[in-house]
Structures are given as C-alpha cells and as structure tokens.
Amino acid sequence: MQDYIVVGGGIGGVVAYSILKKLGKKVLLFEKLDYLGGCAGTFKKDGLFYNVGASTLVGLDENLPLDILLKILDIDKNTIPVLPIDPAIVVYTKDKVINRYKDFERAFEEIDKNFPYKNNKNLWNRVKKVSTNNWQNIYKLLPFNPKNYPDLLKKVITNLDYFLSGIKDSLMTAEKVIRHYIPDPDEDYKAFLNSQILMATQCYWDEVNFSFASMGLTYPNLSNYYVKGGMSNFLESIVKDDKNVLKKVKVKSISRVRDIFEVKTNKGEFYTKKVILNRTIWDYCELLDESLKDSFCEVSKKKYSKLWSSATLYFAVKDENNLLSKHHYQILHDKNPYTDSYSFFVSVADPCDSVEGYKSITISTHCKIELWENLSKEEYTEKKEKLKEFILENLYKKIPQFRMLPKTDVMIGTPNTFNRYTGRYKGTVGGIPLRRKYTMLNYPMGITPIKGLYLVGDSVFPGQGYPGVTVGVFNLLLQVEEDFREVFYRYI
Ligand SMILES: Cc1cc2nc3c(=O)[nH]c(=O)nc-3n(C[C@H](O)[C@H](O)[C@H](O)COP(=O)(O)OP(=O)(O)OC[C@H]3O[C@@H](n4cnc5c(N)ncnc54)[C@H](O)[C@@H]3O)c2cc1C
C-alpha cells in the first residue's frame, strides 16, 4: 500500500513525487511515455533529441522556485546539466532585431535603441519594480486557497504591504499602464510587447493585469538556461534512476474502495491512500470511475474557455560552423492563418548536443484549438503542410541561414499531437491564461472535491512553466502535508 501514487511525470508530477519521497512517504510515479517532462519533455528520433515544447529553464536564481526545490531535495545545483544562456532570446520584429539580455540595463538599452520613446525608461523601471516585488513576495501568499471573500480578505490583511503596493498594478490592464507611459506605441513595439507578455501569461496586453505582464516582460532578465541533452534531463537529474518512477506505465482508471484508491494501469493494479494527478482540471475526470466522477471537470471546461494549444515543427539542421549561434529566436510576423497567432519560437540545440554536425530544432507557436477540429484526414494533412510552409517561409525571411543549411525532414505537431502524447484535453497547453476576469477566487487550486485526490500542473494556481508549476506543488503540499511546512519554511 502506497501513501501516494503520482499519475504523470510532467514537471508537476516529478516535483510532487520528489518532495514526497524526501519527506519519507511511500510513493510511486507512473508516466505513460518513455520520457519524463510531458510538455517540457524530450523525445528521441534518429539519435537526436527534440524538446517537445518548453526549451528555456528559469527559476534557479537564489530564492526562485527551482532553487528552493533543490535545497529541499538536498541536490547540489552544480550537478544539474544546464548551460546559462544570455541573451535568452533574440527577437525579430518586422524590421528590428532585439537581444533580450539578462542584465536589466543592457536589456533596456537594446529596447530603447530599437524603440526610442521618451518615457521608456520610466515604463521599464516600473516593470522591473513590479516583477521583483512579485517574486520576492510569492511565498508569503502560500498556502493560497481562498474559498470566499472573507478568506481572501484574511490573506490580504496578513500580507497588507504586498497587496497595497501591488493593488494598482493588479487592477489595471498591462495595456493601460503601458499607454500611461507611451500613449501611442507603433505597431512594431506593440507586437514586441505583446509577444513577450503572451509567452509567459498566455494573454495579450488588454487581457492581463500589469502585475502578471511585468513578470512576462522580465522573463529574460532572470537566469535562463539551456538543459543539456534536452529538457527531460532536468527532471531526470532530480529523480536519478529512481526505481519507483515507472515509465511506460499508463494509468487507465482510478476508483475508491472505502478509504483506499485502486489505480489500474497497463502493468496491473496498485493501492494507495492518496493520489496526485498531473492532469489538467479539464480532463482529470477521464481517469476516474463512475463512483468518483464529479462535475468539476465539466464546469471547468466551460469556465476557462479560449485556451491555447500549440503547433510545433521538429527537424535538425547541419550547422557544423555554428552559423546559428543563439539558442532561442522569436520571430514576429503577420497573423498565421493556421494558428491564429503572431509569433513563433525557435529553439536550437547547443553544439554539445549535436550529432554529426546536426542540431535539433523545435519551433513552437500558440495555436487556436478550433482551427484543427473536425478536419478530414486529407484536410488535416494538407493543413499541416501549409502550416509548415508558413512557418518556414517566415523563418527563412528573417534568418536565411536556416534555408541554407542542410536539414532533415520536418515533423509537424498540432493540438491533436499534444492531446495524443500528453493526454491533455483537446491538446490544451500552457495552463490557464492569466486573464483579469479570473479573480483570485477564480483560479483553480490543486485540491479537488474528492478527498485524498489532488491535482498538480499548469492548470492550477499559479500556472505554467517551471516556476509556476513548482510553486503550485509547494502550495498543494503546504495544505495537505504537515511535515512539508517545516521543511519549506526552513528554506524561504
Ligand atoms: C510549446 C510550449 C513551449 C513552452 N515553453 C516553455 C519554456 O520555455 N519554459 C517553461 O518553463 N515552460 C514552457 N512551457 C510551459 C510548460 O512546458 C508547461 O507549463 C509544463 O511543462 C506543464 O507541466 P505539467 O506539470 O502541467 O505536466 P504536463 O506537461 O501536462 O505532463 C503531464 C504528464 O502526465 C502524463 N500522463 C498523462 N496521463 C497519464 C496517464 N493516464 N498515465 C500516466 N501518465 C500520464 C503525460 O504523458 C505527461 O508526461 C511551454 C509549453 C509549451 C506547450
């Protein structure tokens, strides 16, 4: 009998598993694929690895979530297979190239050189101040699970300074604050700002508050890392061949017999007191048998609408002379009719991971799910080809080296692909868009209506990416595991 079974080896599942194990719990993790990481995983093809989606790692700076995690797990940061990258991203707008450097002053100069607006400095100083304040205070909010206004009020009162200092930035849209400094930014600057905000919040500037947007705008000012051997390797370096982390084990259904959960998999049945599902709030019910089904998933599907998926291209280029000298390029373009988005992100493997001169490339872009629904097989195949052509043409225009270099066949991923591999509902990725209309009472939390069954991952507070999902696990365990509180507060 296990204390916990963790279903899914994405970031949330692995972080939860590792902490529970460190706390001395009897715990198993089942991952249906043959690699860890889910959307932040790495698959292999013809000797090369390809990052599925995520390709930049942040959160290792002092006191950021991954730094705290490694301290809790007693893992030496130097053993993590990462390379610092700076600039984190090179952004190509219509006619500009902007290096997003880590050093704030240098990063600002680069922006100001390209978009010389009078009040730029004041705007970016405010962006920096707000995001720094958020990072410094995030743990004070935990455990965060306000159920009603009085509950929320208590949280506000205990963190009054933070709430008072941030209230204006939380109530106003990013657009409103930005326009306060720069009333009429040109189309290129607007596109640049929106692309940076979208990457981290899944929203455009008129949907998200300035507080969250500031964290997206300063993402490159945190230490950004390339993970050697692919993103899965970060999680592998945490679990280190742990025999209780079982890959290729697919959970088929979960039921409860009295106080115990029965977890049925393709490798047999397992019994546990508690279950942590690394699934989204929209689809976790798919795994529950009739006796456990609740209406939470269905309600969530309706409540959190307009979710993004992603479209991806995977291929390798022969780049022996390192003409592609950066790891991440972001290309802004006119609306992509096959995804409804205005930019895509290009990740290039480091020379240390090249095979016979070939470097693997992952290109990803936000994608509207409905554009890929209800297609016949022929329509689907044709649309994938058009998507590929659109992206490659735009890539070649901006960075001609990509056209010149010999390359392998291109594999194309769509929302259907994300659904098939990660199990996520309709291929939704990136978690909950941090829209203003979802108030603090509206964000989904990891505690489900079913006793002993919890959720981790990017669909629960505070959201996506390595830092967000890790904080979400801290938040859950602070509420359900007393032993964790003592450990956690030792390090923050
Ligand atoms: C294209 C793209 C680019 C991104 N870029 C970045 C980035 O650069 N940096 C960053 O930090 N974040 C990035 N993100 C966001 C980040 O990848 C996600 O927020 C994060 O990986 C989600 O983690 P999760 O814990 O929700 O798990 P998921 O990624 O959803 O993984 C869930 C896991 O559970 C497994 N599973 C599901 N059902 C079962 C079952 N029945 N039995 C067993 N196993 C099961 C799946 O196979 C999967 O491995 C990106 C996301 C995308 C899509």
Image: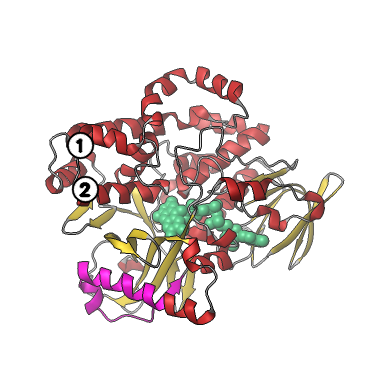
Q: Which residue is situated farthest in the right direction here?
A: 258
Left or right: residue 394 versus residue 210 is left
- Quadrant for residue 102, please give it: top left
Along the viewing direction, whichever of 447 and 5 lies nearer the viewer: 447
Q: Residue at label 2?
A: 189
Q: Residue at label 1?
A: 182
At a point 67% along the width and 57% down the height, the residue shown is 244
Compared with 332, 489 (above or below) is above
Task: State which region is magenta.
Answer: 384-413
Res. 425 mark? none
Amino acid type, label 1 = Ile
Along the viewing direction, whichever of 457 and 352 lies nearer the viewer: 457
Q: Residues within 10 Å of mark 1 (few under 14, many from 20)?
A: some
Left or right: residue 363 versus residue 489 is left
Question: What is the x, y in percent for residue 29?
Answer: 66, 56
Residue 1 in view: no
Question: What is the x, y in percent for residue 480?
Answer: 67, 36
- Quadrant for residue 134, please give it: top left
Q: Is residue 132 magenta?
A: no
Compared with 388, 241 (above or below) is above
At a point 44% along the width and 37% down the height, the residue shown is 436
Residue 489 in view: yes
Amino acid type, label 2 = Tyr
Left or right: residue 28 versus residue 116 is right
